Each structure stands twice: as structure tokens, then as C-alpha cells.
Amino acid sequence: MWKQLYSQTGRMVWFILRRDRLRIPIWLLALSFLTIITASAFTDLYKSAQERQAIAETMRNPAMTAMVGPGYGLDDYTAGPMMAHQMLLFTAIVVAIMSILLVARHTRADEEEGRIELIRSLPVGKLSNASATVLVLFCINVLLALFIGFGLYSLQIESMDLEGSLLYGSALGATGIFFTAVTLLFAQLSENARGTIGLSFTVLMAAYLLRAIGDVSNEILSWFSPLGWILGTEVYVNNLWWPIILTVGASFVLVCVALYLNTIRDLDSGFLPAKPGRKHASRFLQSPFGLAFRLQRTGIISWAIGMYVLGASYGSVFGDLESFFSNNEMLTNLLTPENGLTLTEQFLSMLMSVISMICTIPALMFILKLKAEEKKSRIEHLLSRAVSRSKVIGSYLFLSMVFGLVMLFLALVGLWSAAASVMEEPISFNIMFEAAMVYLPAMWLMIGMAVLLIGLFPQFTGFIWLYLGYSFLVVYLGRLLQFPDWMGNLSPFGQIPQLPVEEMNVLKVTLLTCIAIVLMIIGFIGYRKRDITG
């Protein structure tokens, strides 16, 4: 029986590797290269012990703890602890995203598009595809752990020994293995690829928020988050291996449950079935905008809740942040108050750039849904009726811009309401509102680029995610890693004036808005003229 269930698993492994012969090497090389080059940059950033200790003091505040995790080795802040403290969490999140996307692609997405049914018509075991996907993803994450571990050790940096480097790589690999198991489980529970990815990202986001709240207020809470386990390794400081064993052990349990569920369910079904729709569509649903909204309603609600909670989690540490700044003489000397602004208000500008980039993710997802619908040949049915192409792409664009604004506003409300409840002298809503909304032109420019790609180069729409990732790297981490200014200027988020610290630059904001409009117009023209593919 076991032999029948796993028949031809080896061939399925090669089939998956053949299909992803470019995708997998790009992920592995990009993650390894960025990690190693970032580690080498840390040695040149802060050359004296005094400089390193000064930056360690800035890392003790609750907001940074919520953002990057608790600091280990802050009393002797050498390159190794600095690298683990500032980079491990963000790299682990990227590894988790890689694993979620690859597993969903080879399980639920293939099932949704009928490939699994075709494969099952051949003498292939029922669990062959799922087990082959798990084997490939586990091997990818082990390879990633080895590449990064030995790559970091090869730099021969004094504070990065072999054990710590291998633990750093293992922490990333274990994260990938855990989210491989989580996604495989949701591929059995959900009825489609969208639900699988959405539920997996919800777990990732919940893990991040749970760890952030726990790290600031209650350490026990962090141990309910897999990301909290990973940061519990205390890489390059205490080098604890048991959190890796815990993470991998939990992953194997989830994989066993997922494989069992796979054996007892029918093809194309899920344990969380979607409710049957109404027999007749409402007038709202019969419009292109109503249809676009209905298709993404669940995602919109999920992101809206997530953005409010994200803002509230950051806002909840503002009270501690204020007292931390006022009680820390070194930081008070480092961050001299400007223009009568408090140090917390100055910190607000940096936080808003991060929040605005996170809010750009759902806005881009809403507009790129049009490309996904076209790929599944559903747009053809819509365009075969008395509906113009401009109206179709305009509906998705309107949805993206409106709900991009809503996401940013909800994150702002969450941040302000939580901050106001914990601060003795709360920052006014107007200051926070201006600091957040000034990033809208940058978001619109990113949406404009997505429209341009959909209209002219639909096969390259994935480029927009690379550009957003680049923006995050240079705008947020660029300050820590001291990247040259021109790298930040290549991102629209790097052009936005940081209110309330800087003065409003109307010219730059207007220019970004005009560029966004031009990109959208070109994208509209291209979409009207090009062939629709299916």
C-alpha cells in the first residue's frame, strides 16, 4: 500500500526540478548573495568599538525590538551579533515567502489547473506529487542553510565562527521547512491556490505580530510564534540549537497531518469548502468593478485587519519608546531634537516609510489580479460581452488605488489609537496623517508601473515585486548599511520627504504623481492594443 501511494515519487522530483530549473537557482543565489554581501558590509560600517556600542544603544528601544527582535550580545556588539540581530528575522521572512510560493505552485495551483488530474491518470501514487514537493523544498532549504552557513564562515570575520554561521544558515533553512509544511497543510484545507497562499501568509503575519508583541511585553508569548523560536537561537552569542530541532520537529508533524489529509480527500476538494454563491448575481456584481471587488473581497478584508493590527502593534510600544529615549543619555545626545520635535516624532518618519511599503503589497496584489485572471482565460469571457478593455483595467486600477489608500489609513488609525493610549503626551493625529499620506504618490507610482507592465509586458509583471523588495532594502536597511544616496533615489519611497522631520517638497511629490499618471495612461493604451493571452 505504501509503495502504491508513493509510486514514481522520484520522477515527480525530477519533474519539479525541471520546471523550476531557473526559479530555484535564482532564489538560492539571490538569498545567499545578499546575506553574504550584507555580512561583509557590517565590518566596514562601524570600525571602532565606540561606534558599535552607540548603534547598540539605539537597538535597545522597544520599537526596534518589535521590528527586528530582541537584541543579544548588545554589550559587545561585534559584526556577528549585529548581523544576527538586524538581518536574521527579515531574511527568515523572505525564505518563508519563497517556500510558501513554491509549495502552493506545485500543489494547489497545479490541482486547480488540472495538471494533477492529468498526472493521476498515469501510474503515479496518490501522495507522489505532495511528497515530491516536500522533498524538493526540504532539499532547497538545506542547501540554502549550507550555502549561507559556509558562505558567512568563508568571510573569516572574527565574530562569525563556524558554529554560529552554520546556525545562522540552519535558522533560515528551518524557517523555510516550517512554512513548507504549513503551506502543504493549507493546500489540503483550502479549495484553491489563492486560499492556500492567503492562509499561509496569514500565519506568517500572525507569527510576526505575535513575536513583536511578545518580545516587547511578554517573552512567553514569543514562544507561540515560529519566528520567535528562530530568534531564540541567539546566533553568534549563545548559539542555541534546540529551537532548530523544535522547528523541524513541528514541521514533520505538520507534513504527516497534511499527507494524511491528502489521502482522504477527493481531488479538487478542500476541508474548508467555499460557500455556494447566489443563484442570481446582484446588480453590483454585474459591473466590472463589482466583479473585481467580489473576487478579492476576502483578501481585502484580511489585509485590512492585518494593517490595522500592524499599526496598533507598532503604536503600542510608543509609550515605552518615549521613556526609553528620555532615560538614555547617549541616545539623547545622538538624536538631538530638531525644530522642537520629540525624538519619538523623529522616529515616526522612519516607521511610516516601512508601513507605507508594506501597505503597497496589497495594492499591487489587487491590480495584478487582472493578470492572474487573464492567465486563467477568465478575462476572455468578460471581454466577449459589451465591456471595453479600458473599463476592465480601470476597475482593477480603481480598486487598487482606493484600497491602497484604505490600507494606509487603517494602519495609521491603528498606530495613532494605540500610541495615544500609551503616551503621556500623544502625537497629534494631524502629524501622523501627514507623515503617512505623503507616501501615497510613491504607492501610486508603484501601481502605475504595474499597470504599465500589464499593458505592455505582461510576462514581466513579477518585476514589480523585485522593485518593491529593492525599495525596502535601500530605504529601510540602506540607513543601517549606509548605502550611497543614489541607490535610495532610485526608489520612489526614497524621494518622499520625511514628515515631520523634513519640510514638505511639493515639487517632488507632484512629479511622482505625474509620472504615475503617465505610466497608467501608457499601460491603458498598451492593454487596449495587445493580444489577450490565456
Image: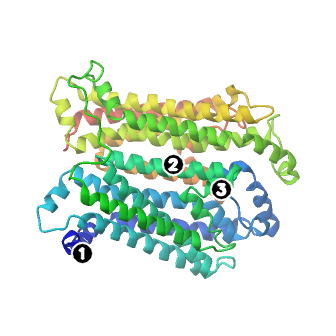
Q: Which corner quadrant holds the C terminus?
A: top left
Residue 405 location, x and y as percent?
Answer: 50, 30
Question: Which mark is on residue 220?
Answer: 3
* Residue drawn where x is 76% and y is 60% of the image: 56
In the rendered structure, which disc, 1 or 2, sits on the residue that comes first in sequence? 1
Residue 314 location, x and y as percent?
Answer: 65, 42
Element on which disc 3 rests? helix
Residue 443 location, x and y as percent?
Answer: 50, 37
* Residue drawn where x is 51% and y is 48% of the image: 205
Give the Cα distance between marks 1 and 2: 34 Å
Element on which disc 1 rests? helix
Q: Is residue 442 above or below residue 152?
A: above
Q: Viewed as shown, does residue 525 lie left or right of 399?
A: left
* Residue drawn where x is 56% and y is 51% of the image: 208
Q: Viewed as shown, does residue 366 lie left or right of 93?
A: left
Q: Viewed as shown, does residue 422 lie left or right of 152?
A: right
Q: Amino acid at mark 1?
A: Gly
Task: Decide which of 75, 263 is in the foreground and name it.
Answer: 263
Q: Amino acid at mark 3?
A: Ile
Q: Which residue is under mark 2?
A: 205
In the rendered structure, which disc, 1 or 3, sits on the residue that comes first in sequence? 1
Q: Which residue is under mark 1?
A: 10
Q: Determine whether label 3 and label 2 are within 8 Å by CB.
A: no
For residue 486, say whether it is visible. Answer: no
Task: Decide which of 526, 189 is in the foreground and name it.
Answer: 189
Give the Cα distance between marks 1 and 3: 42 Å
* Residue drawn where x is 22% and y is 44% of the image: 376
Mark 1 burial class by Cα count in 10 Å: few <14, some 14-19, many 20+: some
